[in-house]
Image (spheres, helix red, strand yellow):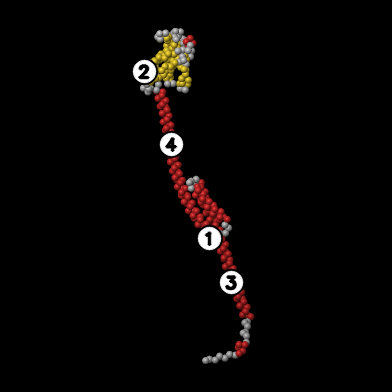
Amino acid sequence: MAEFNFDQNDFLQPPKPASSGSTNKGLKILVVLLALLAAGMGAVGVMKYKEFKETETVLQDEKEQLLNDLNELKINYDSLSAAKTQLQSEVADAKSKVEQLIAELEKTKKVDAALIKKYRRQIYFLRKERDRLVQVVDSLKQANQVLALQKDSLNAQLTEATTYNEKLTQENQNLAQELQKAKVLTATNIVGEGVKIKKSGKVVVTRRARRAGQIRVCLTAVANPVVEAGPKTYYVQVVNPKGEVIGNRDVISVDGSDVITSASKEFNYEGQNTDICIFVVPQSKDDEIVKGEYLINVYYNNTKVGTGNFQLK
């Protein structure tokens, strides 16, 4: 076994101290290291602060973009509201949600990624709802346009039909008036003369005014196929030389005007020429039957159907 020889003084003497030059060198190194560490930590802090500010700016930009998107949606729903369709209630609900989100987002001072994600998701669904409503409103508009065109077409047809009916009604009225005019019994062979009725009932014709007690008007009712057979009435108007209507002075309406007549006669019409005579009895013989020319007008169914004249000496 090998032997080791130790001197007691080796253990009793303290170690020799380092030189002052070595100590200063170590301190310098430590200071440099601490300075480098501080500089590194400062650089990291600056970078972290810069990243934080950049993130904050991005989030604020995202917030502004969200507000722009929401305001765009609000404008879209305003347009849908103006469309005045059956979807007013649904449009109003969706618009209310958009306005609520705008109010909430404007009040939010600090935003983060989670909040941005939440709002983006809500905007996504609101856009989907807007697109659906726009499609439905467009369909309703098209349907309303078709209905409007159909209504216009029906109105045009109705107007045309109304015009045609009015024209037809007018034509029928004209035809009725023409038929009414055609349904007259024209009087011809109108003869007026003075007569005197004897006690025996015999009628004596006279040309002298002072001898005539009455005026007799004889005429022929001309057959008309459109006039139905049955009782008919003629009215005669006899105007003396003084321009006075003599006789019973009954009043009838002719073309909306009152006409004074002298006498009337009801007779039976059987669809053929019919001869009749009508006697006019003056109210005052001395005043009404005078010398001169007399005018005769004959009326049937409120229409003048013949005229004649005669003279008394």
Point 48% across, 48% down: residue: 87
Point 42% across, 30% down: residue: 169
Looking at the rendered structure, the kind of residue marked 3 is Leu
Q: Quadrant of residue 37?
A: bottom right
Q: Is there CB contact under 8 Å for labels 4 and 3?
A: no
Q: Which residue is mark 2?
A: 273
Q: Earlier in the sequence, mark 2 or mark 4?
A: 4
Between disc 1 and disc 2, the foreground one is 2
Residue 259 place in picture, x, y as percent = 47, 19
Q: Is 153 drawn above or below residue 41 in the view shown? A: above
Q: Residues within 10 Å of mark 1 (few under 14, many from 20)?
A: few
Helix, strand or loop for disc 1: helix
Looking at the rendered structure, the kind of residue marked 1 is Ala
Q: Earlier in the sequence, mark 1 or mark 3?
A: 3
Q: Which residue is mark 1?
A: 114
Q: Which residue is mark 4?
A: 158
Q: Is there CB contact under 8 Å for labels 3 and 2?
A: no
Q: Earlier in the sequence, mark 1 or mark 2?
A: 1
Residue 79 in sight = no
Helix, strand or loop for disc 4: helix
